[in-house]
Amino acid sequence: MISETALLESPALRNGVLDRTDVLDRVKVLSLLPDGMHVTTAMVATYFEVGLEAIKSLVKDHRAELEGSGYHLLSGEPLRSLKDLSGSQSHARSMALFSRRAVLNVAMLLRDSEVAHQVRVYLLDMEYLARTQPVENPAPTDTSALDARIDQRITHILGRTVVPMFNTLIATSGEHRRELIELREDIENVERKLCWHHRRLAVLEGEAPADDVRATLKAMTWQAFEHHVAGLMQRDGCVDVVVRKARTDRGIDITGRTADGRTVAVQCKNRAGRWTVPSADMQKFAGAARAIDHVDIALFVATCNFSLESEAIAKLSGVITVNRDELEAWSAGVRLKALR
């Protein structure tokens, strides 16, 4: 069996497994740009949970190898087209892009990342199974598991690629705006039905996903809950997601950006189910998010419900509330509509 050390040190071994990009999503969802094929340097850093400089340094040291696996600089008209598609306001004259193969290549080079380590372990396990599985005695296919993976993959593609593309088209379209909005709603309906279908299959197979999610959330400390919400944001395509320090957060626990560049601020409240978010907490967050930070999307996420007064303040100030039931659905795999 190939060792992890050998993989880290051998370009030939790395090149031999570059096509197994499916392992990336099995370890952690890789958010893609609206073209459905590439990610930026910042998105790679977010995926591997390392600093931006770590990825830049890796590219500098292994540029030729990474270029061979799909890393390249985009400029000129192709860059303008990508900016139009993603709604980017960047004025940079070039942009570094990584293909999925290049991201996998990074995983096989990056030493100081737990996510990269997990990718390598999964990759090596898959390689070992592929080498040792007898050809004349293939493993039986679990069709139900395959159906579930297909559902999840379709949902992932719809959420990461198709819906953001429609958002961009709607924003720049005049004549066909109504038709595009209707098409987007149809796609979102398909996505919701797939999520419902996946949950129904889980129940029929004897699982209780809602109960499991509820118990998991209940057991979290407030710090763990903030990181859980940050992880959900990243799963739904947000980048530059940062959990802020309690002493300096000014009522904002998490910040980030959506895939199309909108700024996001989040307040998290992990309280018992009978407790409701009071109006004072909502006023503080609304003031910080809107008056001070001027964010595009303000989310108040709670493990409980909101008081009538706090709901009214949220509506007036444009804060989007995520209550207990909505949080459980989000945690179970349903994408949060506000982040689309």
Image (spheres, grey):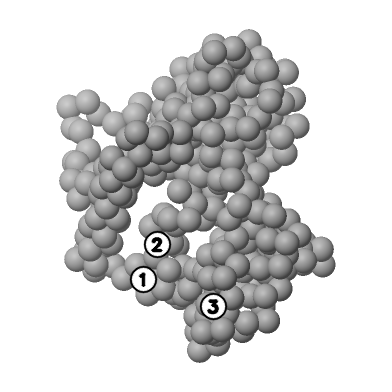
Give the label, 3 or 1, closer to the camera.
Answer: 3
Residue 290 is at least partly visible in this image: yes
Q: In the figure, 2 relative to 193: above or below? A: above
Q: Earlier in the sequence, mark 3 or mark 2?
A: 3
Task: Name which residue lies at 66% across and 14% down.
Answer: 63
Return the residue nearer the eye: 306 or 132: 306
Q: Residues within 10 Å of mark 2 (few under 14, many from 20)?
A: some
Q: CA distance from mark 3 to mark 2?
A: 28 Å
Q: Which residue is mark 1?
A: 210
Location of residue 23 in the rendering, given as x and y in whole percent from the top left corner? 44, 36
Task: Name which residue lies at 73% across and 18% down.
Answer: 60
Tell me which amino acid carries mark 1. Ala
Say which element carries label 2: loop
Q: Which residue is mark 2?
A: 332
Q: Which residue is mark 3?
A: 312
Q: CA distance from mark 3 to mark 1?
A: 28 Å
Tell me which amino acid carries mark 3. Ala
Task: Name which residue lies at 28% across and 40% down.
Answer: 179
Q: Earlier in the sequence, mark 2 or mark 1?
A: 1
Disc 2 and disc 1 in contact, CB within 8 angstroms: yes
Q: Residues within 10 Å of mark 3 (few under 14, many from 20)?
A: some
Tell me which amino acid carries mark 2. Ala
Location of residue 35 in the rendering, given as x and y in whole percent from the top left corner? 44, 28
Return the residue nearer the eye: 150 or 132: 150
Residue 74 image-quadrant placement: top right
In this rendering, position of residue 292 left or right of residue 147: right
Say which element carries label 1: helix
Q: Earlier in the sequence, mark 3 or mark 1?
A: 1
Say which element carries label 3: helix
